[in-house]
Image: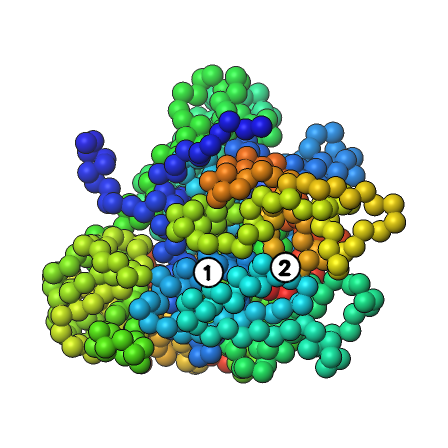
Amino acid sequence: MSAIEHLPDIDNGLLRFLTCGSVDDGKSTLIGRLLYDTKTILADTLHAITRTSERRGLEAVDLSLITDGLSAEREQGITIDVAYRYFSTGRRKYIIADAPGHEQYTRNMVTAASTANLAIILIDARKGLLTQTRRHSYLAHLVGIPHIVVAINKMDLVDYDQAVFDRIRGEYLEFAATLGIGDVSFIPLSALNGDMLVDRGDRLDWYSGPTLLDILENAPTAHSERDERFRFPVQYVCRPQKSGDPKLHDYRGFMGRVESGEIAVGDEVLILPSEQRSRVKAIEIHGSSLPRAIAEQSVTLLLDDEVDVSRGDMIVRAQELALVTRRIEAMLCWLGDTALDPQRKYLIRQTTRETKAIIEAIDYRLDINTLQQLPAERLGMNDIARVAFKLAQPLCVDAYRENRSTGAFIVIDESSNNTVGAGMIL
Amino acid sequence: MSALALQQHATLAHLDWLESEAIHILREVAGQCANPALLFSGGKDSLVLLRLAEKAFRPGRFPFPLLNIDTGHNYSEVVDFRDLRACQLNERLIVRSVEDSMRRGTVVLKSPGESRNKHQSVTLLEAIEEFGFDCCIGGARRDEEKARAKERIFSFRDEFGQWDPKNQRPELWDLFNARVHKGENIRAFPISNWTELDVWQYIEREELQLPSIYFAHRREVIRRNGLLQPVTELTPARAGDVIEELTVRFRTVGDITCTAPVESDADTIARIIVETATTTITERGETRLDDQTSEASMEQRKKEGYF
């Protein structure tokens, strides 16, 4: 039946992106359309949504039903959680984090944004910039997403009018400048008709820029843009001396992932926080030796000297120190049902390290609609604040702006073990 | 070379990225959990997990045993392969059987012919209690089914093994939180972000061996509700059924009573990859008799403690 014997090789890596907007902006339709036009939706799923569309008395198949979630959510008629979707174009693999745009769900947006390298912010062409557009943009910027695509959707409902697009674009640029958002691109769309998503369509001739998919195909992936300083938090120490193989008796492998930068055999390294010095003897993975390891690669490092290294330590290059500190200041997004209580001790997990922490001060709470700084005694769910923590044990940190791996932490409530906060070190 | 290419660092191809992420997740389980186990059935996803565990922990032993919940209704090719692979890797394999739970009376079938698939949850929870496991590593993927699209990589289960979609921990960056109180449990899914195609491409790249029933073979089947039901002792032909002998392969392997093969000539991994990339039906839609029961059936099973 088929003459294809081999698939084209995907060689352009993996891009994680985020879509923000509410159902009213056509976000679900946009995702459904991307999946449908890249042929990710298979016949049985399409059949199921066709039946549902018919049952609801709709004339055309409602592609937004593809992202319809759990029955627990359908009962409430809203999306309560981040959903992850996958598609591939043959050149690149994509992971979409689909964050609900509902007013009270800042925590979902921050969660979805934390792993994304690009954000698509949807604007309804009829409505222009709304409070939620500003909120989404601020959060995307706060969480350090380097590329923002403003998708001005529902162009079909404004007669594909260029003047509408230009006006919204101008307003957004003005607002973006106040936040310091640098890399923004704008695209006119009709997700409903599929114009300018995968295909250009023939109703937006005045727009000569790339389609949405072109933007995605060419956007830099996260690991191509990372901090160049080598950061290797140790996850696990491999000491197989009981294996019976005498060659392995003295084997001490430090297992982890290169969070940024790169490392080569022979490089001089420092172990933090102890500041012991050594040199990389070998880089291994599953029996094979590598001359070097790059960002996002999980490897095992062997060192020249018998140094004392355990989980939670960080290996860096001798001339590229991270800050070892018992006090951090951070932008904190509160995620827990229970309010942050400044009298309590919390647990902070950063890289592979954990420490108890107390709140030294809440400098201010940010109103994310007006960006006003307000005084605060406690923080409730979805609040964002600037907070200073005192730490029981030192952490090895970089500023989040410079390194999204070593500058990020979560706050854990020890009584429930729940993750209750997300922090970005200043 | 362009200026842009010079600025950008070397990057990982998509399979390397997925592999590296999965190794990172496995090592986090080892670093954070006191007593984890890896769920291993002999199926393709769990065979991928074993290769990833080798990459994560060799030259050391795995810091967890392998655990299989056997319904007693699995294809012998898969069961044999499970035992062989555990032996080759020299790792400890624990098998707990749904039939033992039936003897204990903790699993009661509605009828002798009822599928034992969903009853695996009971046996799994019994095994977790028996060994005191605080984390079970599984091969589930988010692209499999819509109830899984919102699944965390570290998924929290209460002391009844229940998954409450409204009570899951936020999961940010790669900072996983595996802390539990006694009796509670984490399910960790290192290949959450993989698709069926990624799994097959990885199997090809790593030259992994698979049970023979994944490849095209002749088999007696009956067409039922648009699916192919294999004719076996457990699923015999009923009066009026038309038995056909077709060339088929299994896309997923599970309990005999609920896994259907598909018509296919694909007898090599390369051919399976091409078929997977060009198929028009989802993996579960084509092969799982248990997911067709109701629109929300996977969600329901997970709430009851399924993987």
Residue A365 located left or right of residue A272 = right
Q: Residue at x 50, y 38 (%)?
A: B271
Residue B122 located left or right of residue A196 = right
Label 2 Cα crowd, 10 Å radius (few <14 / some 14-19 / many 20+): some
User: What numbered label is drawn on residue B49?
Assistant: 1
Residue A102 picture location, percent across and down: 58, 51
In the image, A5 versus B305, the foreground residue is A5
Q: Earlier in the sequence, mark 2 or mark 1?
A: 1
Residue B127 picture location, percent across and down: 59, 77
User: What numbered label is drawn on residue A46?
Assistant: none
- Chain letter for the residue marked with disc 2 in the picture: B
* Label 1 SS: helix
- Asked if one can make out residue A222 in the rendered structure from this viewpoint, the answer is yes
Callout in the foreground (2, 1)? 2
Q: Quadrant of residue A316?
A: bottom left
Q: Residue at x 64, y 41 (%)?
A: B247
Give amino acid for label 1: Leu
* Label 2 SS: loop
Q: Quadrant of residue B108?
A: bottom right
Read off the residue under disc 2: B75
Label 1 Cα crowd, 10 Å radius (few <14 / some 14-19 / many 20+): many
Q: Is residue B287 above or below residue B69?
A: above
In the image, A341 versus A258, the foreground residue is A258
Q: Is residue A359 above or below residue A139?
A: below
Residue A258 picture location, percent across and down: 27, 58
Give amino acid for label 2: Tyr
Residue A212 located left or right of residue B290 = left
Q: CA distance from mark 2 to mark 1?
A: 20 Å
- From the image, which quarter does the C terminus of chain A lie in? bottom left
Look at the numbered discs 2 and 1 and tell me whether their residues touch, using CB distance below 8 Å: no
